[in-house]
Amino acid sequence: MSAGTRLWELLPRRTDVAQLRRSPRRDLLAGLTVAIVALPLALGFGVSSGLGAEAGLATAVVAGALAAVFGGSNLQVSGPTGAMTVVLVPIVAEHGPSGVLAVGLMAGVLLVALAALRAGKYMRYVPAPVVEGFTLGIACVIALQQLPDALGVAKPEGERVLVVAWRALREFAQHPNWTAVALALSVAAVMLLGARRWPKVPFSILAVIAATAVAQFAGLDGARPIGDLPSGLPAPSLAFLDLSALGSLLTPAVAVAALAALESLLSASVADGMTVGQRHDPDRELFGQGLANIAAPLFGGIPATGAIARTAVNVRTGASSRLSSFTHAVVLAVIVFTLAPLVSRIPLAALAGVLLATAVRMVEVGSLRAMARATRSDALILVLTAVATLALDLVYAVVIGLVVAGALALRAVAKQARLDQVPLDHGDHSAEEHALLAEHIVAYRIDGPLFFAAAHRFLLELAETSDVQVVILRMSRVTTVDATGALVLKDVVEKLNRRGIVVMASGIRSGQRRVLESVGALDLLRPAGREYATTPEAIRGARTHLEGAGLLPPRPARVSGTVATETEQAV
């Protein structure tokens, strides 16, 4: 299937239009509610990114509308998010606003490519401790990013959020601004306490309106406002694109695309879990987010992702189709065109309070406690991911979490691999015959995976076997074999053969033959007739070998009611 055909399949379908007709009133009301919640968040994240509140609004409108139409979830709400803001701050510091817009455009193209490659399904392989640690780290970073505005000081220079927060605290200690602190804490308190009592009331917008009114009517000097906003979206333009700088922007674009994919698919999965009968298409979601991120920079918007908090509000208010998320974008567009002068008066400290409350809400204490109590490995992955998110970079944090989780998972799987010496089956041998066989034959059973993380541990011990003539490897319980395991097995067989010990194998599965053949391990067994389907056959083969070597007497056999040796029977 060509990439063009694949992308054609990701376009909107007739079923999407049919779903819009199910409960349009409820979807319109849900969209209005989400827009009210999203407005202060869009403004706040735009300011935090360094491109200004207008960039956050443009992202919420343009990216929110396109992702609603082309995305893979009926309930996903997209726009600027705290996680993305964390990645954008150092990009702004190094490449400026035009660099951020170019990075967003490039990230959108990468997301469309990921959709064409069907990469969405790999989201399921991200372990829960990585997601929880990632979310915890983001919450801490978002909270620290708000300190300059919450304390009423100019944002200090620096790329690392810990450094900027520390410098903001020192500046506040020298020139305290208690007005900004009071506004930020009041807005955060109203949101957190009000949501406990009346969870369906949009306290974020109510608290921001109240803080703005108090700052305006009381003439508070310490309440620095957002500033002038354009009354509408700018005309689409590619003036920001500098082709000569694209090479240096590729790495941050990959980071932005990876984060957008991770957060969007995670948010869509959360929405699925909150509903019955709703399932998102991960590849189509990547496609929709790609188009949204291609278009948003043309209007001055920052990169967007699926927003977990706004998506959760959308679900809780009864949304059932993508009409609600599209309505949210339309309502925000109306606000941009009609209420820009009023929005420009909102104190930055009030927006900081909204984001502080959002950061607190992101932390699910119950989930963290459960993850920490599950296993030591889960707790370690969670802590490492959270610390890496806070101290390094979000994408690096996820990579570190995945690497550590993978290493610990391999360690756990490797521990399941065992090599046990097992007694020989009696079969039709007499007790005396069985005792003779046991003197010269030893059988080992391999359980579990025979792969790079486990093979050396026990197969090298097998190579030290001595005082026997035949080793039988029972391999029917081997779950998987990789090239490393096959090579180690071949090495062991060669070492035993050089010492005069014959190795026979039984129960090799058909799916494992290709690997064993590719490294030549089967060539040591099959040509010499030392591979058998079952263990009893291998034991009979071992007995025949011992008889030929003169270590066992020929086995008697019954012929016409008399006892004869196998040699006589053959004659």
Image (cartoon, helix red, strand yellow):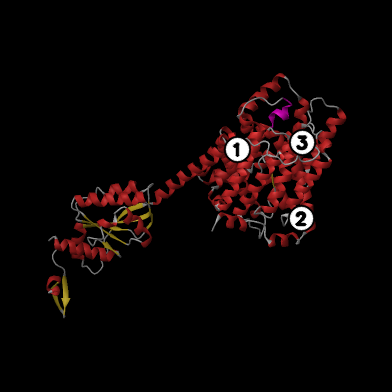
User: Does residue 135 belong to the magenta stretch?
Assistant: no
Residue type highlighted by circle 3: Val
Of the numbered discs 2 and 3, the one sitting upstream in the chain is 2
Q: Closer to the camera, 475 or 419?
A: 475
Q: In the visual, does 458 lie left or right of 257?
A: left
Residue assigned mark 3: 187
| Secondary structure state at the residue bearing disc 1 | helix
- For residue 257, above or below residue 346: below
The alpha-carbon separation of the residues under discs 1 and 3 comes to 23 Å
Amino acid type assigned to the residue bearing label 2 in the image: Asp
Checking the image for residue 247, the label placed there is none
Task: In the rendered structure, find residue 137 and report the number of the disc placed on it.
Answer: 1
Dot 2, how many residues are within 10 Å of its Cα: few (below 14), some (14-19), or many (20+)? Answer: many
Pick the quarter of the image with the C terminus. Answer: bottom left
Question: Residue 431 at x, y = what percent?
Answer: 21, 65
Residue highlighted by disc 2: 27
Quarter of the image that includes the N terminus: bottom right
As for residue 150 lying within the magenta part, the answer is yes
The mark nearer the N terminus, 1 or 2, is 2
Are the residues at dot 1 and dot 3 in contact (C-beta closer than 8 Å)?
no
In the image shown, does 550 or 41 lie closer to the viewer? 41
Report how many numbered discs are placed on residues in the image. 3
Residue 486 vertical position relative to residue 509 in the rendered view, above or below: above
- Callout 1, which amino acid? Gly
Give the magenta part as a residue range: 146-153
Binning the other alpha carbons within 10 Å of mark 1 as few (below 14), some (14 to 19) or many (20 upward) gives many
Q: Nearer the viewer, mark 2 or mark 3?
A: 2
Residue 423 in the image, given as x and y percentages of width and height: 27, 59
Task: Give the main secondary structure, helix, strand or loop, of the magenta stretch.
Answer: helix
Asked if one can make out residue 377 in the rendered structure from this viewpoint, the answer is yes
Mark sitting earlier along the chain (1/3): 1
Q: Residue at x 19, y 50 (%)?
A: 498
